[in-house]
Image (spheres, rainbow, N blue to C red):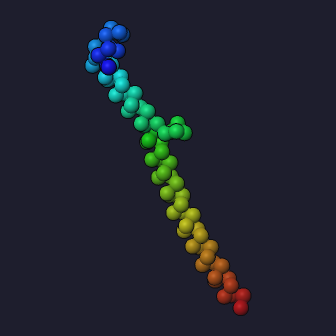
Amino acid sequence: MSAEVARRLGVSENNVNRWVRQYRDNSEKTSTDGLTREQMEEELERLRKENKRLEMEREILKKAAAFFANESK
């Protein structure tokens, strides 16, 4: 099929194959919301860090609540 397309366009079959490969690579790199794989990985890393920070804050608040509950007795 690429030979037919190449003939009709007047280019080499290698060019057509390369264009198809580049198109597939580019479409695989972009998610449905328009982010590239690299952007999604960066966002994931940011969210993991934020999640860890929030978990630590929650633990601090739980300990503070327990401390003040014991102090008020």
Q: Residue at 68% of width from left, 85% of height from top?
A: 69
Q: Residue at 41% of width from left, 31% of height from top?
A: 26
Of the pair 56 and 47, the residue shown nearer to us: 47
Question: Which percent across, then down, holds residue 43?
Answer: 50, 48
Q: Quadrant of residue 57?
A: bottom right
Q: Residue at 52% of width from left, 39% of height from top?
A: 32
Kindly give the residue lying farthest to the bottom in the view shown.
Answer: 73
Of the pair 41 and 30, the residue shown nearer to us: 30
Image quarter hosting the N terminus: top left
Question: Which percent across, then down, holds residue 62?
Answer: 61, 76
| Left or right for 51, reference 69 | left
Of the pair 23 and 73, the residue shown nearer to us: 23
Q: Residue at 47% of width from left, 42% of height from top?
A: 39
Q: How many marks on residues?
A: 0
Q: Quadrant of residue 64?
A: bottom right
Does 42 appear above or below 53? Answer: above
Image quarter hosting the C terminus: bottom right
Kindly give the residue lying farthest to the right in the view shown.
Answer: 72
